[in-house]
Amino acid sequence: MTAELPRPLRGFVAPRVTPLVDRDALDVAGLERLIEHILAGGVHGLFILGTTGEAPSLSYRLRNEVIRRACRQVAGRVPVLVGITDTSFIETIHLAQAAAAAGAQGVVLAPPYYFTAGQSELLAYLEALAPEMPLPLYLYNMPSHTKLVFQPALVRQAADLPNVVGLKDSSANMIYFHELLHLFEGRRDFSLLVGPEELLAETLMLGGHGGINGGANFFPRLYVDLYEAARAKDLDRVGMLHRQVIRISTTIYSVTRDSSSYLRGLKCALSCLGLCDDFLAEPFRRFGEAEREKIRGYLADLKLL
């Protein structure tokens, strides 16, 4: 069985965390439970090795293991997208090749971080990379982590390159997303997906194709239901579900003021639910018992615990 990758890709794609037991070892049983939990929530796809998956902090050996295990377990039930972002052009190609060999349906690429490239340089980079891709390629706009932006004009040019089929925007800049919607108004085969779940409802009502939001790791049905309510234009239900998303954002993701609070809270929630270990790759550490107790309370309020 092989999942088809629709053009455009619509729906809700879960950006799966990477369950770990130490800095270079997977929580294999947790990974398997987590995938089944996410798929049972009705998601339309799975995204591995993204920001929520801590990909830049993982060894290449571990990233390749994640790709193989995830694709084998999903077994074509939904499309699997694989993050291939790297500072090395060659390693990006190697990750894409590993994804194709394992049976993934697409790859996802943020700009190469560290050196600050201009827009013309980023376009030249994509012009060189896209023909080398063995799978459809989604761009990933993540300026808070890469220092770089795929500007709307560049995205529109890149959409004419071979294999470039969509974009995930995690900038949290709705003006940027409005510009993309305008530029792609007549382009029906290019997916525009949103990362910050706080903007999912607005994005869907404006005509975006879907979301890739971290809360789906522990509460996938909420985000799938929100997508379906927006498609049905059930505004009352959209509003109710959106309020639940904001509750999660202001509680589970906001236990501390650190920028890592989202990921630490997310992994802690998964651990409290018995889905996987909450070990994080360096430089981060799991929450202590005081923070963990807060997470338990928030999950109980959501009727998940």
Image (cartoon, grey):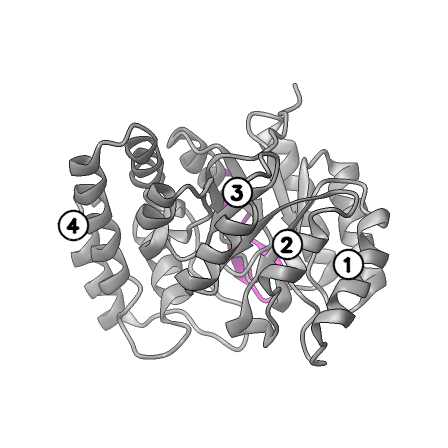
In front of the other: 258 or 152: 152
Q: Residue furthest top?
A: 1
Sooner in the amino-acid sequence: mark 2 or mark 3? 2
Task: Residue 201: tell me if it is visible.
Answer: yes
Q: Is residue 87 visible?
A: no
For marks 1 and 2 on the same chain, the one whose residue lies earlier in the sequence: 1
Rendered-image quadrant of the N terminus: top right
Q: Which mark is residue 252?
A: none
Front residue of 273/227: it is 227
Q: In this view, does 14 lie to the left or right of 252?
A: right
Q: What residue type is labelled 2?
A: Leu
State the separation of the CA atoms marked 2 and 3.
Answer: 18 Å
Q: Does the magenta stretch include residue 210?
A: no
Q: Find numbered disc 4 in the image and state the secondary structure of the residue it sits on.
A: helix
Q: Do the residues labelled 4 and 2 touch (CB within 8 Å)?
A: no
Judging from the image, what secondary structure is the residue with disc 2 in? strand
Viewer-proximal residue among 114 and 185: 185
Q: Which residue is drawn at 62% across and 27% down?
A: 75
Task: Check the image and report above or below for 237 versus 275.
Answer: above
Measured from the top left, where is residue 124 in percent x and y? Answer: 81, 64
For label 1, the residue is 126
User: First in sequence: mark 4 or mark 2?
Assistant: 2
- Dot 2 corresponds to which residue? 139
Q: Which of marks 4 and 1 is nearer the N terminus?
A: 1
In the image, residue 26 above or below residue 74? below
Residue 262 location, x and y as percent? 37, 65
Query: Which of disc 3 and disc 1 is earlier in sequence?
Result: 1
Q: Which mark is residue 185?
A: 3
Amino acid marked by disc 3: Glu
Distance in Å between CA atoms under marks 4 and 2: 37 Å
Q: Nearer the viewer, mark 1 or mark 3?
A: 3
